[in-house]
Amino acid sequence: MLILASASPRRKHLLSEAGFQFTVQVRPTDETWPEHLLPHQVAEFLARQKALVWQDAELAQNLIIVAADTTVVLGQTILNKPADAAQAHAMLHALSGKSHHVITGVAIRTAAGIQSFAESTKVTLREVTRAEIEAYIATGAPLDKAGAYGIQDGFGMAAITHIQGCYYNVMGLPVARLYPYLKQLMG
């Protein structure tokens, strides 16, 4: 049985489109990380934390847990989900006209142990106007997304000029990298 340990509608959609049947079960997880971690290590650490909330005794032989976490890294600064509209505005303004990295950490846990990896995609935004940022924030969409934007929504479509790496990673799940792991585990 496959469990997606994420409430993200985008991850649910991607895993389903990849042909997997699963249930969604999310457990509360402490999403703080050790200060010594580099920004590109944080997403994988958090994905592992989300997979490790299941106790060993709960892991039946056929249970597979997939957990993920996505961070946006601008320079050495991590931009997670904005707390409010003002923070979303600050993030989008900071990203405007620059390249950044979207990093998704994935952890796959079974009774045999845990495997994890992180996938990074470089994303470049054109310079966006204050009016464009304000109109996007007014939709409410930025508030549930790392870095305050979604590649798949109208703002992302209009503002992103270049990506280097996996498109689906920017949506929150590097399917091409995860797929072989799951196929091997599921037979």
Image: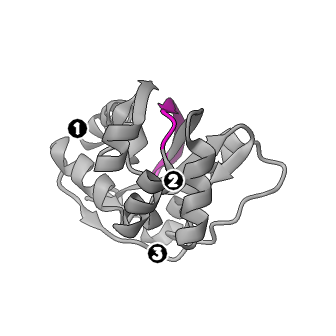
Q: Report how far apart the C-alphas of labels 2 and 3 lie in the structure.
A: 37 Å
Dot 2 falls on a residue whose secondary structure is helix
Label 1 vs 3, first from the N-terminus: 3
Q: Is residue 128 left or right of residue 78?
A: left
Q: Looking at the picture, does residue 99 appear above or below residue 84?
A: above
In what element is the residue under mark 3? Answer: loop
Q: Which residue is mark 2?
A: 130
Between marks 1 and 3 in the image, the one whose residue lies nearer the viewer:
3
| Percent x, y of residue 65 | 39, 57
Q: Which residues are magenta?
A: 106-128
**Secondary structure mostly seen in the magenta stretch:** strand
Q: Secondary structure at mark 1?
A: loop
Q: Could you say where residue 16 lies in the image, as x and y percent from the top left?
A: 19, 50
- What residue do we see at 52% from left, 66% from top? 56
Residue 153 visible within the image = no
Instruction: Find the distance from the CA under tag 2 to the CA under tag 1.
Output: 51 Å
**55 above or below 175?**
below
Residue at 43 percent across and 71 percent down: it is 58
Residue 66: where, in percent of width, then height? 40, 53
Q: Dots 2 and 3: beta carbons under 8 Å?
A: no
Assess whether residue 121 is covered by the magenta stretch: yes
State the quadrant of the C terminus: top left
Q: Which residue is mark 3?
A: 27
Task: Tell me the mark number nearer the camera, choosing from 2 and 3.
Answer: 2
Near mark 1 (Cα within 10 A), the count class, few <14, some 14-19 or many ≥20, is few
Pick the residue in front: 16 or 146: 146
